[in-house]
Image (cartoon, helix red, strand yellow):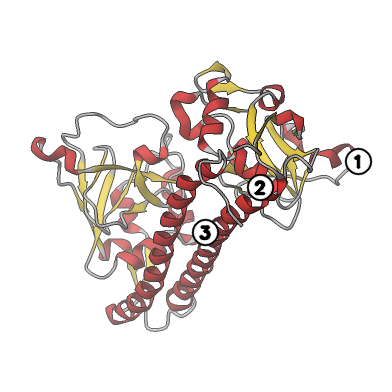
C-alpha cells in the first residue's frame, strides 16, 4: 500500500453538467437526449429516450456524449431508496452520439498521469461510492441532489498508473465477458422473435380464425393464511414481464397480508386491468410460487400454448386491439372477457409443438448466459472494492 496516495476526485477529473433542454426541443426522431432515467448502471441506455429534432449547433457541442464517456446522475432518491438513489454511474457504449440533459453530468479525466479513464469508471461505479454520495445528498427523500463540487471533494486512494492498468485489466476482462453474454442474448432474443414472426405471423396458410379465449382460461386460486411466506409477490411491468415487486419498486407496494392474493405457477399470466400502460401483461417464466394482487386478472394457457400466447400478445397488432377495447372507457380497463375476444390466426397444435421444441432450445441458451452473467457480476462485485483499496495485491 506504500505506493497508494490520497487524492480528491477533483484533483484529476472534472464534470460537465447537462443542458437544460426545453419541452419543444423534444421529438420522436433525431439525436438521443440522455436523461436520468437513461443511466442504467453499468451502462447508459438510449431506449425510450427523447430526441433532439434540430441541427447540432456550436452551443450544444460541449454536451455531446461519445462512446465510453462516463455519466453520473445528480438527482435521485436518498440512501433509504438505494435502487433509485442519486449518483448512478453508467458508461456510454454506443457508436453514435447523444446529448447530455440537465441533472446528468459527464465525468472526464483532466490529469491522466494521476488516474486513467477506465480506472475512474471502476472507481466511481462502486456501490460504496454511490452510497457515500447518497448519504451526503440534500433535499427530500424522492428528490435528493448532489453537486459536481461535492463529487470532486470526495477523497480516494490511488495506486500508480501501472498498478491502475493491471487492476482495470482484470475488471475490464470481467465486464467484457458480461457484455459478450448480454450481446449474445440480445441476438438470441431477436432470433426468437424472427422465428415466431416467420412461423405464425407471415405464414398463416391453414390457420383458422379464432380468439385468444380458445387457448386460455382465467384462474383465481387464493393464498391461504398458512403458507404466505412461500410466495414471491409479482408485478406486471411495461416490458411485458412479471417480476418480483421488491426488485422493481423502491418501496413495498403490496400488502403485508397476502391473504386473497392470487396464486401463480410457472407459465401463468397476470395483468392489472386498470394500468395506464395497459400492455403490461406478463408471464411467470421461473419455476417459483408467485402471487399477484387481488385486483389483477390471472389466466393460464391451455397445455403447450403458453409461449405462443406470450409472444403473440407482444405483437403490435394485438397491442393496438387492446387499446381499442380500452378506449371506450373513462378509465382504461381491459376485462378478461375482452381479452378473450381478441381474434388471431390460430395454428394447429402440431405446429405449436414444433415451434416450442426450437424455441425452448433458444431459451436454454439464453438462460445459460443469464447464469453466467449472474456469476460474473457476483465476482465483479466481490473483488472490485478489494482491488480498488489494495486489499488484493496485484503482482506482475
> Where's the C terminus, which quadrant?
bottom right
Per the image, label 1 sits on a secondary structure element best described as helix
Q: Residue at x 15, y 46 (%)?
A: 221
Give the x, y percent position of residue 202: 49, 77
Q: How many marks?
A: 3
Quadrant of the rendered structure where residue 56 is?
A: top right
Determine the CA span between mark 3 and mark 1. 37 Å
Residue under pointer 1: 58
Q: From this viewpoint, which residue is outermost toward the front?
A: 2
Q: Residue at x 76, y 38 (%)?
A: 25
Q: Are marks 3 and 1 in contact (CB under 8 Å)?
A: no
Determine the CA span between mark 2 and mark 3. 21 Å
Which of the labelled discs sits on residue 178, or is there none? 3
Give the x, y percent position of residue 20: 75, 30
Q: Nearer the viewer, mark 2 or mark 3?
A: 2
Per the image, label 2 sits on a secondary structure element best described as helix
For label 3, count other residues whose C-alpha is less than 10 Å away and answer few (under 14), some (14-19) or many (20+): many
Per the image, label 3 sits on a secondary structure element best described as helix
Residue under pointer 2: 164
Amino acid at each position: 500500500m506504500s505506493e497508494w496516495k490520497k487524492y480528491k476526485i477533483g484533483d484529476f477529473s472534472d464534470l460537465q453538467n447537462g443542458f437544460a433542454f426545453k419541452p419543444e426541443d423534444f421529438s420522436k426522431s433525431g439525436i438521443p437526449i440522455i436523461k436520468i432515467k437513461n443511466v442504467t448502471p453499468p451502462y447508459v441506455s438510449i431506449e425510450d429516450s427523447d430526441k433532439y429534432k434540430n441541427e447540432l449547433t456550436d452551443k450544444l457541442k460541449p454536451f455531446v456524449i461519445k462512446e465510453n464517456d462516463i455519466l453520473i446522475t445528480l438527482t435521485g432518491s436518498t440512501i433509504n431508496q438505494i435502487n433509485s438513489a442519486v449518483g448512478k454511474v453508467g458508461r456510454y457504449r454506443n457508436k453514435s452520439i447523444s446529448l447530455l440533459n440537465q441533472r446528468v453530468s459527464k465525468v472526464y479525466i483532466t490529469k491522466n498521469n494521476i488516474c486513467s479513464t477506465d480506472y475512474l469508471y471502476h472507481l466511481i461505479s462502486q456501490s460504496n461510492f454511490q452510497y457515500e454520495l447518497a448519504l451526503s445528498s440534500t433535499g427530500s427523500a424522492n428528490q435528493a441532489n448532489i453537486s459536481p463540487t461535492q463529487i470532486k471533494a470526495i477523497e480516494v486512494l490511488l495506486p500508480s498508473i501501472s498498478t491502475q492498468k493491471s487492476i482495470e485489466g482484470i475488471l475490464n476482462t470481467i465486464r467484457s465477458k458480461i457484455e459478450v453474454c448480454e450481446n449474445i442474448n440480445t441476438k438470441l432474443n431477436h432470433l426468437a422473435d424472427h422465428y415466431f414472426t416467420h412461423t405464425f405471423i407471415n405464414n398463416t396458410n391453414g390457420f383458422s380464425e379464432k380468439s385468444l379465449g380458445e387457448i386460455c382460461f382465467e384462474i383465481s386460486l387464493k393464498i391461504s393464511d398458512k403458507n404466505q411466506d412461500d410466495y414471491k409477490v409479482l408485478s406486471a411491468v411495461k416490458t411485458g414481464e412479471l417480476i418480483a415487486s421488491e426488485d422493481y419498486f423502491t418501496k413495498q407496494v403490496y400488502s403485508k397480508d397476502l391473504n386473497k392474493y392470487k396464486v401463480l405457477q410457472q407459465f401463468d399470466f397476470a395483468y392489472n386491468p386498470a394500468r395506464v400502460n395497459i400492455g403490461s401483461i406478463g408471464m411467470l417464466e421461473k419455476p417459483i410460487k408467485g402471487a399477484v394482487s387481488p385486483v389483477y386478472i390471472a389466466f393460464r394457457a391451455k397445455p403447450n400454448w403458453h409461449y405462443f400466447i406470450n409472444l403473440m400478445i407482444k405483437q403490435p397488432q394485438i397491442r393496438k386491439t387492446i387499446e381499442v377495447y380500452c378506449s371506450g372507457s373513462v378509465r382504461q380497463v381491459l376485462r378478461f372477457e375482452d381479452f378473450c375476444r381478441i381474434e388471431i390466426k390460430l395454428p394447429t397444435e402440431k405446429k405449436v409443438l414444433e415451434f416450442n421444441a426450437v424455441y425452448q432450445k433458444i431459451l436454454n441458451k439464453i438462460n445459460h448466459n443469464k447464469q453466467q452473467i449472474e456469476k460474473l457480476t457476483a465476482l465483479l462485485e466481490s473483488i472490485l472494492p478489494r482491488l480498488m483499496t489494495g486489499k488484493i495485491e496485484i503482482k506482475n
